[in-house]
Amino acid sequence: MAAVLRAILGYYFLVFMMRIVGRRPGKQITPVEFILVFFSGGLILTCTVADDQSLTNALSQIVAIALAHYLLVLLRWKFPWLSKIVDGTPAVLLEKGKWHSDNMAAMQIMDDDVMAVARDQGLERLDQVEYAVLERNGQISVVPVE
Amino acid sequence: MTKTAPVTDSVKKVNNEFAVGDDLEFQKSWQKFERGVWILLTIFILLSLAGVFGRGPLAQGHIQASDGSLRVDYERVQRFGTPSVLTIHFPPDVIHQGTVQLWASDTLVKPLGTQRVVPQPMKSVIGGGGILYSFPATTVPASIEFQTQPAALGFSDLIVRVPGKAEVKTRIFVVP
């Protein structure tokens, strides 16, 4: 019972913390951010497993986390306001030659991050980008100037 | 037959041309909320370092019997399932014929989870809501160490005394 509750609490706590730490564009996740993800996971693991290393506990906790995740996804789909809280909303980073500095600062994204995605699309300069948007999944979308 | 619905242009546009679906008002509120959370997290870490949640300077407790018959060093706040040490110091006058006796309430064993007593008692007698220990003591000052590992959450009242002397009463809080 307590182990299952610990697993559910741990899952929601990590979801909350990762949301607070902020979105980074997926392709630009640095080794430092990998450390954050894996270290947090490892730390939460020690307290969720505690001294119960049985198969029953492992299966119970996996099922509990799966259910917690399913519930979150279901509620997110049913209630758009919850979707905004869990995933955030897209944020415009660049619009017709102008940076949205407040969004860039809030998301800790540099112009280099946007240029990296632009290069991926075969663009050579930032002035070839009409719009750059940080998506809810953490990716940056770039729309070239027509 | 598959259920279908017409596509509606419901996603908010930038410059009336680029469907992004951003929500500036929400973003601003969320950024404000994030700042608040960072402040709370910083306070949490500072409190944690100080020992408010155990294992820090503020968690350390020292208490002495009114007649000076014993002194207890312990952690006021302990963590569930995490080792802690409670040390009891005796002055020379409570040691008789190489033995010192200590009565401790049974909360020391059950919720507070005593794992080991150093030195090992020569004798322990259960009764009266506690345990009466007899320890060998040949040198002064003498001290006994209870190595504990709390097995229950919340407050636990702990009473210890040398038989016939003033008791020491304290409360230990166990956090998850």
Image (spheres, rainbow, N blue to C red):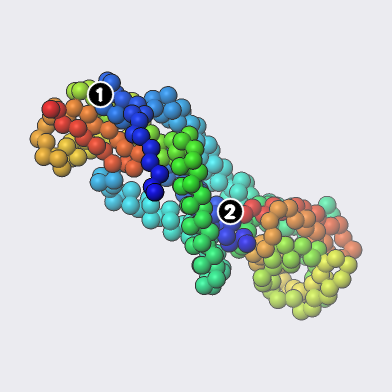
> Residue sitting at 21 percent across and 35 percent down?
A142
Q: Look at label 2 and name its amino acid.
A: Arg
Q: Is residue B124 above or below residue A68?
A: below
Q: Is residue A32 above or below residue A132?
A: below
Residue B4 can be seen, yes or no = yes
Instruction: State which chain disc 1 sits on.
Output: B
Determine which residue is flagged by label 2. B55
Q: Earlier in the sequence, mark 2 or mark 1?
A: 1
Alpha-carbon span between mark 2 and mark 1:
58 Å
Front one among B19 and B45: B19
Determine which residue is flagged by label 1. B17
- Helix, strand or loop under label 2: loop
Q: Position of residue B90 (x, y in %)?
A: 76, 63
- Helix, strand or loop under label 1: loop
Front one among A50 and B98: A50
> Residue sitting at 48 percent across and 57 percent down?
A66
Residue B46 can be seen, yes or no = no
Whether discs 2 and 1 lie on one chain: the answer is yes
Quarter of the image containing the C terminus of chain B?
bottom right
Classify residue B94 as left or right of residue A53: right
